[in-house]
Amino acid sequence: MNENLIIIDNPLAKYYLTMLRRRDTKPAVYRDYVKKIGYIIGYEVSRLLKWKPVFVETSVARTEGIVPGKQVYIIGVLGASIPLMHGIWEALPWAGLGIVAARRFKVENKVLVRLYYERVPQDLSEYTAIAVDPTLATGNTMIKVLEKLDELKCKDYLVATIIASKPGLENLWKRFPGVRVIALSVDPVLNQEFFIVPGIGDAGDRSLSSDEF
C-alpha cells in the first residue's frame, strides 16, 4: 500500500488481535491483550529508533553493546490508548510519557476533531515521538496529534496503532505523506458511524469498562 506502512507479521500478535476482534471478549482480557500488543509494537518500534554503541564491563571482560541514541516520548490519546501506551512503555521504559485528549464531533457525513488537553513537553525538538492510538479510523484524530507535534517542534515522529482503515491511512498520508505507521492490520472500510470494519469495536469502551458477572 505504502512504503511507510509497517505491518507486524507475528503469530502471537495475530492471536491477540483475533481476541480483540471477538465480540464476546471481556474487558479485562481485552485490555490485557491490548497491553501485550503494545509491548510487541514497542519491540518493533525499537528497530526505527536511534541507537549508539557503548562499551560495558562484565564481571570478566569489556564488551560492546548499545544504548538509546536519542530521547523518546510516547504520546497517547486518552483514554482508549491507556493500555496500549503502557505496553509500549514497558518495552521502552526509558521513554517519557505524554497524553493528549481529543473530542470528536460527527457533523453530517464527516468527523471533526478538537484537542482540548495536553500534557507533553513544550519543546520536542530533541525527541523521537511515538504517537499512539489503538485505532486509526478516519485518521482525523491522528492528524490533529501530529499537527500538535509539529507545533512543539518535533521533527522525528511515527504512528503506532493496532488497526487502521484504508481510508484513514489515505487521509493521514495526504496531510503527512512521509509519516511511518506501524499496525497489525489494515481493514478495508468504515461504516456509517465511522467505525473500522471488521475492526475491533470501540477500543475505549471495551478496554476501560469493567467485567460483568
Image: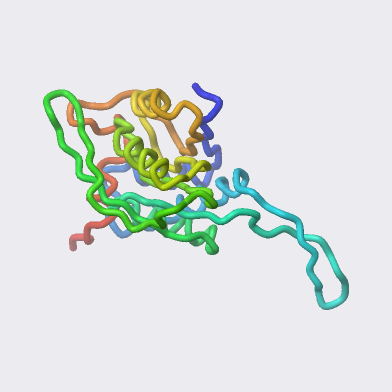
Where residue 189 appears, x then y in whole percent?
A: 31, 24
Q: Quadrant of residue 112?
A: top left
Is 53 positioned to the left or the right of 129 in the image? right
Compared to residue 190, the image places residue 205 above or below, namely: below
Front residue of this view, candidates 136 and 146: 146
Q: Nearer the viewer, residue 23 or 64?
A: 64
Residue depicted at 44% across the width and 34% down the height: 185
Residue at horizontal 26 percent and vertical 43 percent from the top = 23
Residue name at image x 20 percent, y 31 percent: 111
User: Residue at coordinates 53% horizontally, 48% vertically from top-left?
Assistant: 128
Q: Residue furthest left?
A: 108
Toward the viewer: 104 or 44?
A: 104
Q: Quadrant of residue 110?
A: top left
Q: How many numbered markers are drawn?
A: 0
Q: How is the image coloured?
A: rainbow
- Is residue 5 visible to us here? yes
Q: Where 5 falls versus 209 (above or below)?
A: above
Q: Quadrant of the C terminus?
A: bottom left
Give residue 124's position: percent from left, percent from top. Answer: 47, 51
**At which x and y percent is residue 64?**
81, 61
Residue sitting farthest toward the bottom: 59
Q: Residue 158 placed where, x, y %? A: 49, 41
Q: Is residue 52 left or right of residue 138?
A: right
Residue 33 visible to an observer of this rendering: no
Q: Where is 60 relative to 169, above or below?
A: below
